[in-house]
Amino acid sequence: MATSDTALSPGLALPPLTDEDTARSEDRTRVHDARVHRKRWRLLRLLVGPGILAMLGENDGPSMIAYASDGAEYGLGFFVPFIPLLFAMAFVCQEMCMRIGAVTHRGYGELVLQRYGKVWGWFGAGDLTLTNFVTLIAEFVAIRVGLAYFDLGSGVAVALGLTLVLFTLSGGRYWRWERIVLGMALFNGLFLVAAILVKPDVGDLVGALDFTPFPGGSFNTLLLLLASTIGATVTPWMIFFQQSASADKGMTPSDIKHGRYDSGIGAALAAIFGIGALVAGAALLTHNGAGIEGFAGAGFPEALKSVAGSAAGTVFALGLIEAGGVAILTISASTAYAAGECVGVSHSFNNSPRNAGVFYAANVGIALLAAVVILIPGAPLLSIALNANILATVLLPVSLVLMVMLANDKGLMGPWANRRVTNVIGITVIAFVGICGAAYGIDSFLLSTHVITG
Amino acid sequence: MNPQTPPIEDPELAAAIAERDPRRPERPEDQLVMHLERDQLVAETSRPVPPAELSARVRAGLWALRVFVLLVSAMVIYTFFYELH
């Protein structure tokens, strides 16, 4: 810890320092030393984290099953280029969050609350809590699907998920939490291994890059496909998480370049692993893959086993357990950040449970509630899981609009405010997400009320 | 301020931007306390930022967005319960 380089000018009084400041300063000392000694790789290693976690956290259980379902039902065409395109959109959004967090040192929830008023602040937090709760249920279901391959049930899934949450929270340090979850998140690469094990035709993969063949089916099916795939890539929790985590990590404007690398690496890995799940699913295309729909696809690992061997089934099942586990950690963390920021109390992994009770209680509480739901006999888990991504897509424009407003707020961001090109891309992303989500919502509503017929 | 950006007419905004200019030599938030910038200390981040002054057009746009999202969410939730049956 470097207490010797306190460099305040004599005229400025030193504000009181907290344990949180001290913990964060230890991390910043390592960054400072790496920068001074020009250790580039060490500097990169120290500064990556929030971006990779947000991107790989979004390659969660429901998303990977959605990609595999797309592959099983429609094959590789359209989705091979569409998934990287969506992660490019996610990069634009996440880069903004990282930049706002690094410049303002504040989370998304508290900035919205303080800058745009309580109504928007609580609206955003409510929107986040609802989508996070639904998504967390889906994550526990994904773990259960993976464990079912090894003949283990819901109780084990719940115990595993909650143990992970409690274990990662036990250190009282952001750095420790981040490194453990980052280590786990890299096992998202299991989906790439699964793709290699099904021995795909490289020619088919390259041939799919022209966005064809376009998925067939009804208009509503196409909208569902677009909305759920977008919801599998860009979500409200990622926005809350990356901005708050960047601030909690102690990032500053001088780290923005490395923050971009972090988000870029995360987006690239997530796109590659997402395509891995798609390719693994596509192996089932000619083996009644379309029959293994969504979460009814508890049979995915088993089906892969029968088509591509037990190794492929086992790796896919392990991948689902990993994807669900990591997402439980990151999504619970985003809920905790939002709760602490909106209530106006301490919200940092660098603080102890005694000093940041709301933060830790929200982190464990939302995971616990979701776990309880999957233990309820007869709960409509399939419908909940399928609708989680859709709901996230519908609610996403609010978070995105406020994020772009913050990133353009020159009073907050100064010279780090958005450039025109970033705004053009950001607004295009918002329009695309908004139109897809709204079109699906309206079309499904009209179908269910029989105003139109499918 | 970046010389390529157009001049800011609002004097308060211009002052706020100048305050955060990284080339300004004596920016208080750049002063380090145990390798933390002054404005990232808990004591500093606990102080709320002032509310933004939104134009009537922006406020109307935000209200329209709020109504739009609530309506579409209601449709999705209705469809969810409809499909359950």
Image: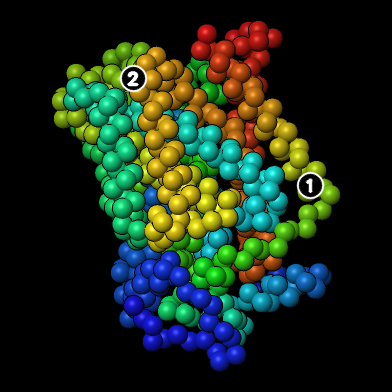
Question: Which residue: 67% across, 45% down?
Answer: A120
Kind of residue sitting beneath label 2 = Gly
Is residue A267 shown left or right of residue A453? left
Picture coordinates of residue B67, whole percent (x, y): 73, 33
Q: Name the element at disc 2.
A: helix
Please, what is the three-letter code of the amino acid marked with disc 1? Arg
Q: Name the residue under label 2.
A: A297
> For this rendering, which residue is in front, A159 or A175?
A159
Place of residue A95 in the rendered image (x, y in percent of width and height, measured from the top left): 51, 55
* Parent chain of label 2: A
Chain to which mark 1 belongs: B
Quarter of the image for the N terminus of chain A: give it. bottom left
Q: Residue at x 62, y 12 (%)?
A: A447
Q: Position of residue A325 (x, y in %)?
A: 32, 39
Image quarter of the C terminus of chain A = top right
Q: Nearer the viewer, residue A86 or A369?
A: A369
Mark 1 sits on what residue?
B59
